[in-house]
Amino acid sequence: MPCSRDKITPLAQMFLLSLEVCGKGLGLWLLHIQGKRLSPPQCSNPTVHVLTGSACHKTSSGHSHLFLCSLCSEGDWWLAKSLSTGRKGYVPSNFVAQVDSLEEEKWYFRTLSRKDAERLLLSSGNKVGSFLVRESETTKDAYSLSVRDNDSAHGDIIKHYRIRSLDGGGYYISPRITFSSLPELIHHYSQKGDGLCQRLTAPCTSLVPQRPWAQDEWEIPREALKLVKKLGSGQFGEVWMGYYKNNIKVAVKTMKEGSMDPDAFLAEANLMKKLQHNKLVRLYAVVTKQPIYIVTEYMAKGCLLDFLKTEEGSQLNLPKLIDISAQVAEGMAYIERMNFIHRDLRAANILVSESLCCKIADFGLARLIENEYLAQEGAKFPIKWTAPEAINYGVFTIKSDVWSFGILLTEIITYGRIPYPGMTNPEVIRNLERGYRMPCPESCPGELYGVILKCWRSNPEERPTFEYLQSVLEDFYTNTEKQYEPEPQQ
């Protein structure tokens, strides 16, 4: 996270607490506010803990002597106080741990789900033998060990082992050998595999969350943004990579003048900024004077539609494509719970991070663009993604989003192919009225096509919920494969 001091702003001064960790000049940045106290977003339950922090926590074998006192422990960034200097600032929550707790261990990811453990271990920076320990999702006072392995037929995969507790204290994977503590267990299997798929080589790496965005920096001046690289353009504006105050990398959507009403946009944007989820692109700020600017988090690999057509994207295997689908379903399940509607769900509106995390963009924006959804003409109206009731009657609900999700699944499984290939928009409308549905794409598993067809049921109320779709896609392989590896017998 380094940043040269000539880029430090008066409001948010970044200072480095130098830590000689792992023999390298690594450090931990804190955000220090001068003359203005900022609280992390959605901080409702302040607590105080004595913490130890390290710039390479969960990324290397080094240790730090920095102790932090957390003033608020919610979200990706915590407001903290250095016990040595007394200075306050923000720290990445996954880089600190309570002193003398299991959380100090670089391999311990307490509440991480099985699915997220697999995603994290398969991300860049990890290799065969990388591992983590997490709490069991199904058994109280039990843990799971997740290890990256390599299979000649399937490539790199993740295997999971139950870590069971002894009544008198202690832990084991195989009952033939027990350990008094989890660190002792990990140390043993780091020395030799002893029946596991791999010897444990290195704790799973953990990414630094993006820097916190000050809660009160919502309507910002255009001059605070520096547009650096044009990422794309469309009917209603352009998308740029840029910097806010020269030190926070952002994406900026510049809207053409007249494309939307500024007052209506600001009202909608105030609702949109309340939607915060790790599968939704974070809305940071807006410039409300024409031309309107929308400032969001930056996603390095761009939109999913374009990414699927790249050399990297076109080589993704089926399990990864299913995982991308599950990530989108997870984000839409959150939108569903919040009683919101997307209205324009398609691969072009899903963004991809460096670690292949997929996030939903432009939620709530579609209906603000004048006339986009008022007529069936031209490229403005995304006919091929739109549910029949929305095309015919202008009725948009979360169930019309489910229909669009079914179309999105065909985009993913075909690496970005246009839906209804060879058909014009009027032909699509006529065929849908006759009950036509796209046939199963080549290489699409029958079980997945069955899920797609459920999304395209004529009666909107008979379409599944996104909560259901998330669970089905996350468990797509789990239901047919063993959840845990057998106990080592060697």
Image: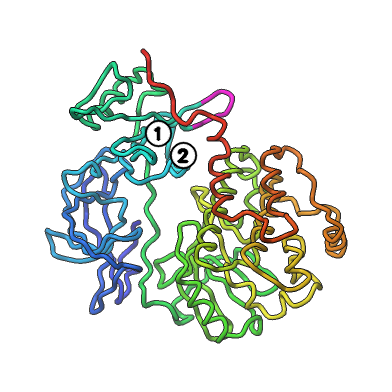
Q: Dot 2, crowdedness within 10 Å: few (<14), some or many (≥20)?
A: many
**Separation of residues labelled 1 and 2 (CA atoms):** 8 Å
* Number of the label disc, if any, that sits on residue 118: 2
Q: Is 235 drawn above or below residue 16 in the view shown?
A: below
Q: Is 429 drawn above or below residue 222 in the view shown?
A: above
Q: Position of residue 220 (x, y in %)?
A: 44, 80
Say which residue appears at 25% left-offset and 44% top-offset: 103
**Left or right: where 30 falls relative to 155:** left
Figure quadrant of residue 70: bottom left
**Left or right: where 461 falls relative to 135:** right
* Number of the label disc, if any, that sits on residue 146: 1
First of labels 1, 2 by sequence position: 2
Is label 1 in a helix, a strand or a loop?
strand
**Colouring mode (rainbow / by chain / secondary structure / one colour):** rainbow
- Identity, as a three-letter code, of the amino acid under mark 1: Ser
- For the residues labelled 1 and 2, say whether their Cβ atoms are less than 8 Å apart: yes
Looking at the rendered image, the quarter that the N terminus falls into is bottom left
- Identity, as a three-letter code, of the amino acid under mark 2: Glu
Region in magenta? 151-157
Say which residue appears at 52% left-offset and 82% top-offset: 267
Is label 2 in a helix, a strand or a loop?
helix
